[in-house]
Image (spheres, rainbow, N blue to C red):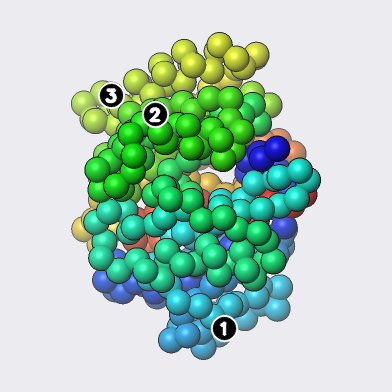
Amino acid sequence: MMKLIPEWKDHEKCLIAWPCNKDLYGSVIEDARLEIANFANQISDDEQVEIYCNLSDFKECLQIISNSKINITQTNLDDSWMRDIAPIFYKNNGRLESYSFNFNGYGKYPNYENDNKLSEFISSQLNLPIKKIDLTLEGGAITYDENGNLFTTESVLLNPNRSNPKKNIIEEKLTTLFDLNSIIWLPTGLEGDDTDGHIDNIFCPIGDQRYLIAKSNDQTTFDYKSLTEANLILNSKLSLTVNNLKIIEIPLPSNKIIHNKKLVASYINFYSTKNTIFIPKFNVKEDEEVYDIFKSLFNNKKIEMIESANINYGGGNLHCITMNVPKL
């Protein structure tokens, strides 16, 4: 029986891709690398970290990281969004296995061939069985709970630029691959998201029948309307099968601008280890409120806010640049 393993379960290691796309990051790429190095160093206190980087960046990566607890592996990368290009791990009769889905650069970026091959390279390194699936799906486009529910957005999986089959065929395929009870579709993600609206910026199960959803306080925005609709859908669908359901709203950060670019930013894009919750820090008024919310939700863990504005400038954040390998 094949089952997805929720992210809050123990990890074997954390996978990270070293930023390499200078067209994407521009002048902030070195600052983004420093932010990722700081983040990786903190994760390594809790779990093993594996960083993948291009040969041309290997020497610099070694110098910046300088941590014996972090392993650095040379490979070929086009971009740095490990969540979207790593294998999707699952448990099959007590054994960890993996799927490799198609990656097509979000249907809009031309150079993605190396990233499309990375999941098979990683699974080979980890000595895990891997099966190629003919469906375009990025890891940030899905999330899942302990009840056999998978969550995604129509704006991504049903977008013509992904060249996927019809909705009912996608549902049949994913349900079979992961032995799901249901697939809950939300309309879209955040406005301006380069991925067309990944769910990991707006929604996240955290265990014990608790779910986090992003909230906009500005009623004039697209995000306010779309997130209000998403909240209604989730309450309607989940209340049918989840006892003691708790959906907790997490405010979006105030408009965050760096180098004249407005960031698509969310605290939902966090990473968790056994001991620590790492949340993006935006240096806006919502930081303190969100810290307090997370502290009340995870009172048995440390809460660390991570400077990540330059990572976010490239289009993602802490969840986007990582992939957890589950520990069985």
Q: Secondary structure at mark 1?
A: helix
The amino acid beneath tag 1 is Leu
Q: Residue at x 58, y 78 (%)?
A: 73
Choose between 282 and 13: the one closer to the eye: 13
Look at the picture and state if 321 lies above or below 248: below
Q: Which mark is residue 62?
A: 1
Where residue 136 appears, x then y in whole percent? 39, 49
- Residue at label 2? 168
Foreground mark, 2 or 3, reads 2
Where residue 268 appears, x then y in whole percent? 48, 40
Look at the picture and state if 2 lies above or below 130: above
Q: Residue at x 31, y 74 (%)?
A: 22
The residues bearing labels 2 and 3 have C-alpha atoms spaced at a distance of: 26 Å
Q: Is the N terminus in the top left, top right, bottom left or bottom right quadrant?
A: top right
Q: Which mark is residue 225?
A: 3
The amino acid beneath tag 3 is Lys
